[in-house]
Image: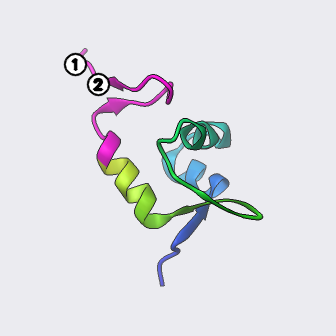
């Protein structure tokens, strides 16, 4: 069975970023979570996040930008 909940640490490995970045995505309201001891992220929410923000720069999750062709 696929995991249906991820921790911030697990998502940071999946996203290849640090845990702080995952927490920033949550704080900015881009990645919904629930709290069961620590914050947990539903697999479907992660998939929706990836679809919604594909082609965007979320380096600063409080100021999402379209990717520019360099």
Task: Classify mark 2: residues with Cα within 10 Å, few (<14), some (14-19) or many (20+).
Answer: few
Q: Which residue is mark 2?
A: 66
Q: How far apart, in angstroms, are the residues tagged by discs 1 and 2?
A: 10 Å
The percent position of residue 41, horizontal first and vertical second, equals: 56, 60
Is 54 on the left-hand or right-hand side of 2? left
At 32% across and 31% down in the image, what residue appears?
Answer: 56
Query: Was residue 53 drawn as part of the magenta stretch in this picture?
Result: yes
Q: Position of residue 22 (x, y in %)?
A: 59, 43
Q: Residues within 10 Å of mark 1 (few under 14, many from 20)?
A: few
Is residue 26 rendered to the left or right of residue 52?
right
- Residue 59 lies, with reference to residue 50, above or below; the image says above
Q: Residue at x 47, y 78 (%)?
A: 2
Whether label 1 touches label 2, CB < 8 Å: no
Kindly state the secondary structure of the residue where label 2 is placed: strand
* Main SS class of the magenta portion in the image: loop
From the top left corner, tell me how far across and down residue 65 is, in percent.
35, 23
> In the image, which residues are magenta?
52-70
Instruction: Give me the residue at 48% from left, 27% from top.
Output: 59
Q: Is residue 42 above or below residue 24?
A: below
Q: Secondary structure at mark 1?
A: loop
Residue under pointer 1? 69
- In this rendering, the label closer to the viewer, 1 or 2: 2
Residue 53 in picture, x, y percent from top left: 34, 40
Task: Give the total number of marks visible in the rendering.
Answer: 2
Image check: 40 left or right of 61? right
Q: Can you say whether 35 is above or below 19 in the image?
A: below
């Amino acid at each position: 069975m696929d995991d249906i909940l991820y921790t911030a640490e697990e998502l940071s490995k999946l996203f290849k970023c640090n845990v702080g970045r995952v927490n920033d995505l949550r704080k900015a309201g881009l990645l919904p979570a629930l709290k069961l001891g620590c914050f947990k992220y539903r697999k479907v929410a992660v998939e929706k996040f990836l679809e919604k923000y594909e082609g965007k720069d979320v380096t600063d999750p409080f100021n999402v930008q379209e990717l520019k062709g360099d």
